[in-house]
Amino acid sequence: MEPLERARLSVDKFFESSSNVVCAESITQSIVGKQGKAAYREESRYTYQVETTSASGSIKLKEFREARKIAFRDPARTLLVTNGFASLLLIVHSTYEASYQFEPGEEQTVDGVTLQEFRFKAIPGGASPAALQLRGKSYPLPLSGSVWIDKRSGAITRLTAAVDSSLKDLGLQGMSSDIHYSLIQFHDPEEAYWMPASASIDVETPLQHWRNVHRFTGYRRFKATIEVEMGKAE
Protein backbone atom coordinates (compact mmCIF):
# COMPACT_ATOMS: atom_id res chain seq x y z
CA MET A 1 0.00 0.00 0.00
CA GLU A 2 3.06 2.28 -0.09
CA PRO A 3 2.07 4.02 -3.38
CA LEU A 4 -1.30 4.86 -1.80
CA GLU A 5 0.40 6.52 1.16
CA ARG A 6 2.55 8.52 -1.25
CA ALA A 7 -0.60 9.50 -3.11
CA ARG A 8 -2.12 10.91 0.09
CA LEU A 9 0.91 13.21 0.42
CA SER A 10 0.62 14.11 -3.28
CA VAL A 11 -3.04 15.09 -2.84
CA ASP A 12 -2.10 17.31 0.11
CA LYS A 13 0.45 19.03 -2.13
CA PHE A 14 -2.13 19.48 -4.88
CA PHE A 15 -4.60 21.28 -2.62
CA GLU A 16 -1.83 23.46 -1.21
CA SER A 17 -0.66 24.54 -4.67
CA SER A 18 -3.94 24.75 -6.60
CA SER A 19 -5.27 27.87 -4.89
CA ASN A 20 -2.71 30.14 -6.55
CA VAL A 21 -3.20 28.69 -10.03
CA VAL A 22 -5.66 29.68 -12.75
CA CYS A 23 -6.29 28.14 -16.15
CA ALA A 24 -8.58 28.19 -19.18
CA GLU A 25 -11.53 25.79 -19.01
CA SER A 26 -13.71 24.72 -21.92
CA ILE A 27 -16.96 22.85 -21.25
CA THR A 28 -18.97 20.85 -23.76
CA GLN A 29 -22.46 19.95 -22.51
CA SER A 30 -24.12 17.25 -24.62
CA ILE A 31 -27.31 15.28 -24.86
CA VAL A 32 -26.31 11.81 -26.07
CA GLY A 33 -28.50 10.03 -28.62
CA LYS A 34 -29.27 6.35 -28.96
CA GLN A 35 -26.23 5.74 -31.18
CA GLY A 36 -23.87 7.15 -28.52
CA LYS A 37 -23.33 10.37 -30.49
CA ALA A 38 -24.18 13.89 -29.40
CA ALA A 39 -27.72 14.76 -30.47
CA TYR A 40 -27.31 18.30 -29.13
CA ARG A 41 -24.46 20.20 -27.51
CA GLU A 42 -23.41 23.59 -26.21
CA GLU A 43 -19.87 24.89 -25.64
CA SER A 44 -18.62 27.50 -23.19
CA ARG A 45 -15.23 28.84 -22.08
CA TYR A 46 -14.14 30.20 -18.70
CA THR A 47 -11.18 31.25 -16.62
CA TYR A 48 -11.12 28.69 -13.82
CA GLN A 49 -9.71 28.64 -10.30
CA VAL A 50 -10.11 26.41 -7.24
CA GLU A 51 -9.84 27.83 -3.74
CA THR A 52 -9.07 25.48 -0.86
CA THR A 53 -9.85 26.21 2.77
CA SER A 54 -9.36 24.12 5.86
CA ALA A 55 -11.79 24.55 8.72
CA SER A 56 -12.42 22.30 11.72
CA GLY A 57 -9.92 19.81 10.34
CA SER A 58 -11.80 19.30 7.05
CA ILE A 59 -10.96 20.53 3.56
CA LYS A 60 -13.50 22.53 1.59
CA LEU A 61 -13.22 23.53 -2.06
CA LYS A 62 -14.79 26.46 -3.84
CA GLU A 63 -14.68 26.93 -7.62
CA PHE A 64 -14.56 30.26 -9.43
CA ARG A 65 -15.43 30.67 -13.10
CA GLU A 66 -15.18 33.90 -15.08
CA ALA A 67 -17.04 33.61 -18.36
CA ARG A 68 -15.09 34.04 -21.60
CA LYS A 69 -17.69 32.61 -23.96
CA ILE A 70 -21.24 31.68 -22.94
CA ALA A 71 -23.06 29.19 -25.12
CA PHE A 72 -26.43 29.92 -26.65
CA ARG A 73 -29.05 28.46 -24.32
CA ASP A 74 -31.92 26.62 -25.94
CA PRO A 75 -34.80 26.99 -23.43
CA ALA A 76 -36.32 23.78 -24.74
CA ARG A 77 -33.26 21.76 -23.64
CA THR A 78 -32.33 20.62 -20.15
CA LEU A 79 -28.57 20.17 -19.80
CA LEU A 80 -26.39 18.70 -17.09
CA VAL A 81 -24.46 21.11 -14.85
CA THR A 82 -21.25 19.58 -13.48
CA ASN A 83 -18.84 21.17 -11.04
CA GLY A 84 -16.84 20.32 -7.97
CA PHE A 85 -15.23 17.23 -9.49
CA ALA A 86 -11.82 18.50 -8.31
CA SER A 87 -13.03 17.36 -4.90
CA LEU A 88 -12.96 13.73 -6.08
CA LEU A 89 -9.25 13.68 -5.20
CA LEU A 90 -10.43 13.82 -1.59
CA ILE A 91 -11.28 10.12 -1.96
CA VAL A 92 -7.55 9.56 -1.48
CA HIS A 93 -7.11 12.26 1.17
CA SER A 94 -6.55 11.25 4.78
CA THR A 95 -9.77 13.09 5.74
CA TYR A 96 -11.78 10.35 3.97
CA GLU A 97 -9.48 7.44 4.85
CA ALA A 98 -12.24 5.79 6.90
CA SER A 99 -14.83 6.21 4.13
CA TYR A 100 -13.23 4.07 1.41
CA GLN A 101 -11.71 0.64 1.12
CA PHE A 102 -8.75 0.27 -1.27
CA GLU A 103 -7.19 -2.77 -2.85
CA PRO A 104 -4.29 -2.90 -5.35
CA GLY A 105 -5.03 -3.73 -8.96
CA GLU A 106 -2.79 -4.09 -12.00
CA GLU A 107 0.44 -2.31 -12.84
CA GLN A 108 1.06 -0.69 -16.21
CA THR A 109 3.86 1.31 -17.78
CA VAL A 110 3.01 4.52 -19.65
CA ASP A 111 5.80 6.62 -21.22
CA GLY A 112 8.34 4.87 -19.03
CA VAL A 113 6.38 5.54 -15.81
CA THR A 114 5.12 2.61 -13.73
CA LEU A 115 1.54 3.14 -12.60
CA GLN A 116 -0.19 1.16 -9.86
CA GLU A 117 -3.96 0.88 -10.00
CA PHE A 118 -5.92 0.93 -6.75
CA ARG A 119 -9.60 0.04 -6.81
CA PHE A 120 -11.80 1.70 -4.20
CA LYS A 121 -15.35 1.37 -2.95
CA ALA A 122 -17.37 3.31 -0.44
CA ILE A 123 -17.77 1.93 3.07
CA PRO A 124 -21.46 2.01 4.07
CA GLY A 125 -22.16 4.97 6.32
CA GLY A 126 -18.95 6.77 5.35
CA ALA A 127 -18.72 10.38 4.22
CA SER A 128 -18.56 11.27 0.53
CA PRO A 129 -16.83 14.27 -1.11
CA ALA A 130 -19.39 14.26 -3.95
CA ALA A 131 -23.11 14.93 -3.98
CA LEU A 132 -26.00 15.08 -6.42
CA GLN A 133 -28.08 18.27 -6.37
CA LEU A 134 -31.63 17.41 -7.30
CA ARG A 135 -34.79 19.49 -6.82
CA GLY A 136 -33.09 21.65 -4.19
CA LYS A 137 -31.76 18.73 -2.15
CA SER A 138 -28.27 17.28 -1.82
CA TYR A 139 -27.69 13.51 -1.94
CA PRO A 140 -24.21 12.15 -1.04
CA LEU A 141 -22.93 9.79 -3.73
CA PRO A 142 -21.59 6.32 -2.82
CA LEU A 143 -18.63 6.15 -5.22
CA SER A 144 -16.53 3.25 -6.43
CA GLY A 145 -13.79 3.22 -9.05
CA SER A 146 -10.04 3.29 -9.56
CA VAL A 147 -7.04 5.59 -9.18
CA TRP A 148 -3.78 5.19 -11.10
CA ILE A 149 -0.74 6.24 -9.08
CA ASP A 150 2.83 6.89 -10.17
CA LYS A 151 4.64 4.39 -7.93
CA ARG A 152 7.73 6.58 -7.62
CA SER A 153 6.22 10.02 -6.94
CA GLY A 154 2.75 9.14 -5.66
CA ALA A 155 1.13 11.42 -8.26
CA ILE A 156 -2.39 10.48 -9.36
CA THR A 157 -2.54 10.39 -13.16
CA ARG A 158 -6.14 9.22 -13.59
CA LEU A 159 -9.25 8.75 -11.45
CA THR A 160 -12.48 7.04 -12.46
CA ALA A 161 -15.57 6.96 -10.26
CA ALA A 162 -19.09 5.66 -10.67
CA VAL A 163 -22.33 5.34 -8.71
CA ASP A 164 -24.06 1.99 -8.43
CA SER A 165 -27.80 1.38 -8.73
CA SER A 166 -28.53 2.42 -5.13
CA LEU A 167 -29.92 5.80 -6.30
CA LYS A 168 -32.48 4.41 -8.74
CA ASP A 169 -35.26 5.67 -6.50
CA LEU A 170 -34.10 9.19 -7.51
CA GLY A 171 -34.45 8.32 -11.18
CA LEU A 172 -30.69 7.95 -11.61
CA GLN A 173 -29.78 5.00 -13.78
CA GLY A 174 -26.04 5.60 -13.89
CA MET A 175 -23.35 8.18 -13.20
CA SER A 176 -19.65 7.95 -14.06
CA SER A 177 -16.64 10.24 -14.32
CA ASP A 178 -13.18 9.89 -15.81
CA ILE A 179 -10.54 12.47 -14.86
CA HIS A 180 -7.03 12.66 -16.36
CA TYR A 181 -4.14 14.66 -14.89
CA SER A 182 -1.00 16.08 -16.54
CA LEU A 183 2.31 17.30 -15.14
CA ILE A 184 2.39 21.10 -15.49
CA GLN A 185 5.69 22.96 -15.31
CA PHE A 186 5.69 26.35 -13.60
CA HIS A 187 8.49 28.91 -13.49
CA ASP A 188 9.86 31.41 -10.98
CA PRO A 189 10.27 29.27 -8.98
CA GLU A 190 10.76 26.14 -11.08
CA GLU A 191 8.11 23.70 -9.86
CA ALA A 192 5.92 21.03 -11.43
CA TYR A 193 2.49 19.89 -10.26
CA TRP A 194 0.00 17.32 -11.51
CA MET A 195 -3.14 19.24 -12.45
CA PRO A 196 -6.45 18.22 -14.10
CA ALA A 197 -6.23 18.01 -17.90
CA SER A 198 -9.70 16.69 -18.72
CA ALA A 199 -12.83 15.37 -17.04
CA SER A 200 -15.70 13.48 -18.66
CA ILE A 201 -18.95 13.02 -16.72
CA ASP A 202 -21.88 10.87 -17.87
CA VAL A 203 -25.30 10.80 -16.20
CA GLU A 204 -28.17 8.59 -17.35
CA THR A 205 -31.83 8.31 -16.44
CA PRO A 206 -34.37 6.00 -18.09
CA LEU A 207 -35.28 8.84 -20.48
CA GLN A 208 -32.09 10.86 -20.93
CA HIS A 209 -28.31 10.60 -21.27
CA TRP A 210 -26.05 13.60 -20.67
CA ARG A 211 -22.31 13.93 -21.14
CA ASN A 212 -20.18 16.88 -20.09
CA VAL A 213 -16.51 17.18 -21.04
CA HIS A 214 -14.24 19.69 -19.27
CA ARG A 215 -10.78 20.51 -20.65
CA PHE A 216 -8.12 22.56 -18.84
CA THR A 217 -5.25 24.35 -20.57
CA GLY A 218 -3.00 27.38 -20.17
CA TYR A 219 -2.18 26.93 -16.51
CA ARG A 220 -0.48 29.90 -14.92
CA ARG A 221 0.43 30.83 -11.40
CA PHE A 222 -0.25 34.16 -9.77
CA LYS A 223 1.00 35.76 -6.61
CA ALA A 224 -1.21 37.89 -4.39
CA THR A 225 0.54 40.82 -2.78
CA ILE A 226 -0.74 43.17 -0.11
CA GLU A 227 0.67 46.64 0.36
CA VAL A 228 0.12 48.38 3.67
CA GLU A 229 0.81 52.11 4.02
CA MET A 230 1.51 53.14 7.57
CA GLY A 231 0.24 56.53 8.66
CA LYS A 232 2.57 59.00 10.32
CA ALA A 233 2.04 59.81 13.97
CA GLU A 234 1.19 63.42 14.60
Image: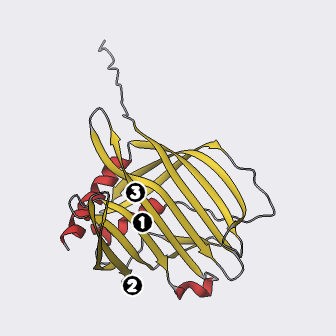
Asked if residue 153 lies left or right of residue 86, the reply is left
Disc 3 residue type (three-letter): Tyr
Q: Amino acid at mark 1?
A: Leu
- For the residues labelled 1 and 3, the Cα–Cα distance comes to 12 Å
Q: Which residue is mark 3?
A: 181
Q: Residue at x 27, y 34 (%)?
A: 189
Residue situated furthest left in the rendering: 2
Along the line of sight, the residue nearer the viewer: 229 or 141: 141
SS under mark 2:
loop
Q: Toward the viewer: 125 or 13?
A: 13
Q: In which quadrant is the C terminus drawn?
A: top left
Which numbered disc, 2 or 3, marks the residue closer to the eye?
Answer: 3
Residue, disc 2? 125
Disc 3, SS: strand
Q: Is residue 121 left or right of residue 152?
A: right
Using the image as rendered, state which of residue 43 and residue 95 is in the foreground. 43
**Of the residues shown, which amino acid type is indicated by label 2?**
Gly
- Residue 157 in view here: yes
Task: Tell me the distance, in whole angstroms, between the alpha carbons under discs 2 and 3.
Answer: 29 Å
Q: Residue furthest right?
A: 76
Give percent across and percent down for residue 130.
47, 70
Q: Residues within 10 Å of mark 2 (few under 14, many from 20)?
A: few
Please provide percent x and percent y for residue 46.
Answer: 57, 45
**Mark 1 or mark 3: which comes first in sequence?**
1
The residue beneath circle 1 is 88
